[in-house]
Amino acid sequence: MRCKVGDAVNEGDTVLVMESMKMESEVKAHQAGTIQSILVKEGDNVQTGDQLVTIG
C-alpha cells in the first residue's frame, strides 16, 4: 500500500502497487480527495473491476 485511510491524494497519485506473475503494476487515483477506506489487504487476490479503495 502506498496510502492509508485519511491520506490526501491527487488525481494520478499511486495509491497501491499490485503484483501479478512477478510483475508490478501501479494503481493510480482517478480523482483527488481523501482515502476513505481500503477494501483490500496485502496478499488478497483481486479481479478486474474490483473496488480497491474509496476516495471521497
Image (tube, helix red, strand yellow):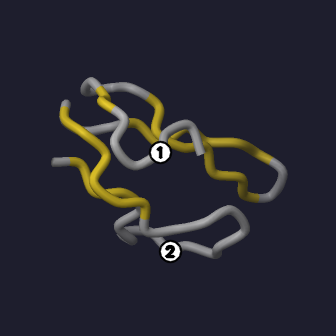
Query: Up-down: is 41 above or below 45?
Result: above
Which circle marks residue 54 in the picture? Answer: none
23 or 52: nearer the viewer: 52
At horizontal 63% and vertical 75% (from top left) the residue drawn is 45
**Sequence-earlier tag: 1 or 2:** 1
Q: Position of residue 21 (x, y in %)?
A: 80, 58
Identify residue for label 1.
4
Mark 1 residue crowding within 10 angstroms, few (<14) / some (14–19) / many (20+): some
Picture quadrant where residue 53 is located: bottom left
Which residue is identified by label 2? 47
Q: Position of residue 17 (x, y in %)?
A: 61, 43
Disc 1 from disc 2: Cα separation: 21 Å
Q: What residue is rendered at 47% in x and 45% in y?
A: 4
Q: Can you say whether 26 is above or below 48 in the image?
A: above
Mark 1 vs 2: CB contact within 8 A: no
**Comparing marks 1 and 2, which lies closer to the viewer?**
1
Whether residue 45 is situated above or below residue 26 in the rendered picture:
below
**Residue at (31% x, 29% y) in the render:** 9
Which amino acid, by three-letter code, is at mark 1? Lys
Q: Is residue 14 left or right of residue 9?
A: right
Quarter where residue 28 is shown:
top left
The amino acid pointed to by label 2 is Gln
State which quarter of the image contains the N terminus: top right
Q: Within 10 angstroms of label 2, few (less than 14), some, or many (20 or more) residues?
A: few
Q: Secondary structure at mark 1?
A: loop
Q: Position of residue 40 (x, y in %)?
A: 52, 68
23 horizontally vs 25: left or right: right
The x, y position of residue 43, in whole percent, is: 72, 68
